[in-house]
Amino acid sequence: MMVSFIDEHRAEYGVEPICAVLPIAPSTYYAHVRQRREPDRRSSRSKRDEVLASGVRRVWEANRGVYGGRKVWHQLRRENVSVARCTVQRLMRRQGLAGVVRGRKARTTIPADVAERPVDLVQREFKADAPNQLWVADITYVATWAGHAYVAFVTDVFSRFIVGWRVTSSLETGLALDALEQAIHARGSADGLVHHSDRGSQYLSIRYTERLAEAGIQGSVGSVGDSYDNALAETINGLYKAELIRKKGPWKSVEAVELATLDWVHWFNNYRLMEPLGYVPPAEFESEYRDRQAAQLRAA
């Protein structure tokens, strides 16, 4: 920044007078100028930084501009690029690159006033040893110029794979039910699976609970009713809002949100590095699990 400033004003004020005000020595400035004229005079670190900076920007842009230094570093390591995390962070700062920051979640589900509801089978322990053991579901919303778009997600706890989703303009039971139907269709057999949600009326409706029963899925509902009761589902909503909605808005229509959500879910499932999974994408995590299971069967 200071070198660029001197370049811009040196003809008017001169290099030495400017350096007398800025925290940079004239010799340092002239060294930068020589290196620009004669790139071979640059230090080995400077040359390597140039190559690494290009790779850092490529990874950041390929992942929708949402990765911070830690995830960019992990992706470069997956590509067998040997670089320190602090170097990646330094090169990101130099290029003005930064990851997204999640915000607070707005309330979208309305607690159902029912005498009986499913028990809490999860007790805030969002863990699973295999796919299709535990799903979590939640709803969020997106403000558009044409009104609100409501978005429902169903996520497999084992891998954080989004198995079902739906975008509509109405906060009715059909929204959550359509996302559930997609999840059931995508995953096939669901016998013994637990479906956990908050106490929203969409999830406690007769249609929804009957569909769970038909598919052999056990319903589970948070018992306390605070944000921790469905924390993993709310985490997915938070990532969605930070990585897509707030980053790409404002949104003109529900249809625009739906198309963008389709693209984001594909990227999230197949490419996004997940820290709880050891910095691999959900699809890869499930694939590795299936490979291990197949290897154990062959060895048996």
Image (cartoon, rainbow, N blue to C red):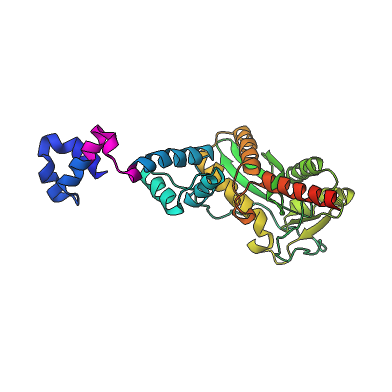
Q: Can residue 152 be seen in the rendering of this structure?
A: no
Q: Is residue 45 magenta?
A: yes
- Quarter of the image with the N terminus is top left
Residue 267, placed above or below residue 113:
above
Q: Can residue 248 be seen in the rendering of this structure?
A: yes
Q: Nearer the viewer, residue 179 or 58?
A: 58
Q: Nearer the viewer, residue 274 or 50?
A: 50
Q: Residue at x 87, y 50 (%)?
A: 210
Position of residue 52 in the picture relative to residue 124 (left or right)? left
* Residue 141 place in picture, x, y as percent: 62, 46
Position of residue 92 in the picture relative to residue 271 (left or right)? left
* Residue 143 place in picture, x, y as percent: 57, 42
Dividing the picture into quarters, in which one does residue 111 lie? bottom right
Position of residue 166 in the picture relative to residue 91 (left or right)? right
Question: Magenta residues, as a range?
Answer: 32-46
Q: Residue at x 86, y 46 (%)?
A: 189
* Residue 158 place in picture, x, y as percent: 72, 54
